[in-house]
Image (spheres, rainbow, N blue to C red):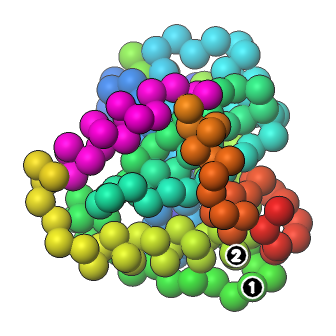
Amino acid sequence: MDEGHLYRIGDLFVADRTSWPQGSHLWLDSDGDTRLALFLTDPSRREIAAVESGTPRFAWTEQDVNGFLLFKYGDSPWNNAPFNPHRLNDPFTAQPIPRGTHSRTFTFLVHADTGRIAAMRMFTWPAYFLNHVVDSVHRLAARPYREAEAQTALQDFYHRYPDGPSLYRLVRTLPPHATCTGGQSDDRPH
């Protein structure tokens, strides 16, 4: 996280930016923190409540040259945020963390049409899950990269997994270490 930056409900997510494209964006910071922003036009009370108090579930999958964080909050449908280390301004340098420790994960629900924060929450990921993600991103970074192929692979993913139920079926096929519940106290896959 940006040290010293204060996030508040109703404030702009990023100073001087008042609109965002609808969708999800994932930042994997080199210090092990994770930020996930969900940009929705006019989020409903139900969507806000899901982020604020719903059980957060996560999964990670590598698909060709892209990684995807799969997530849901409470009874909301599964969703995803793509991630490709080749699109970063600086090389991905995050390292695995010791077993028994946890990393911080921040979620923001932002009004796409105003840039203002509607809901936010912080919890942790267990080491086994963060380490799975970090190892995957390093593998992705080592692969040859061409933007056109990455875009084709991204579109193929959305063709195969167009909605919450299809993402749920994908999550069910992943190994236990590729899934977690945000804030879980143990560091063992379930």
Q: Is residue 119 above or below residue 4?
A: above
Farthest-out residue, right = 185
Q: Nearer the viewer, residue 44 or 165?
A: 165
- Residue numbers of the magenta segment: 150-165
Task: Pick whichever, 57 or 33, lies toward us.
Answer: 57
Q: Is residue 119 visible?
A: no
Identify which residue, 74 or 161, lies in the foreground: 161
Left or right? Give the position of 95 relative to 114: right
**Is 158 inside the magenta-drawn segment?**
yes
Q: How many marks?
A: 2
Please give left or right for residue 15 compared with residue 130 in the image. Answer: left
The residue drawn where x is 72% and y is 35% is 73
Residue holding disc 2: 127
Residue drawn 68% across the image and 47% down it: 172
| Residue type at numbered disc 1 | Arg
Q: Is residue 98 magenta?
A: no
Looking at the rendered structure, the secondary structure element under dot 2 is: helix
Q: Secondary structure at mark 1?
A: loop
Above/below status of 161 relative to 40: below
Which residue type carries mark 2?
A: Ala
x and y percentages locating residue 64 in the rendered image = 32, 58
Q: Count neighbours of disc 2 (C-alpha within 10 A) and say few if under 14, some if 14 to 19, many if 20 or more.
A: many
Measured in 3D between alpha carbons, the distance from the residue under mark 1 to the one under mark 2, in whole angstroms, is 5 Å
Residue 164 rendering spot, x and y as whole percentages: 58, 28
In the visual, does 81 lie left or right of 173? left
The secondary structure making up most of the magenta span is helix
Residue at 30 percent of width and 39 percent of height: 156
Circles 1 and 2, Cβ within 8 Å, touching? The answer is yes
Quadrant holding the C terminus: bottom right
The residue under label 1 is: 99
* Local crowd size for mark 1, using a 10 Å CA cut-off: few (<14), some (14–19), many (≥20): few
Q: Position of residue 173 (x, y in %)?
A: 63, 52
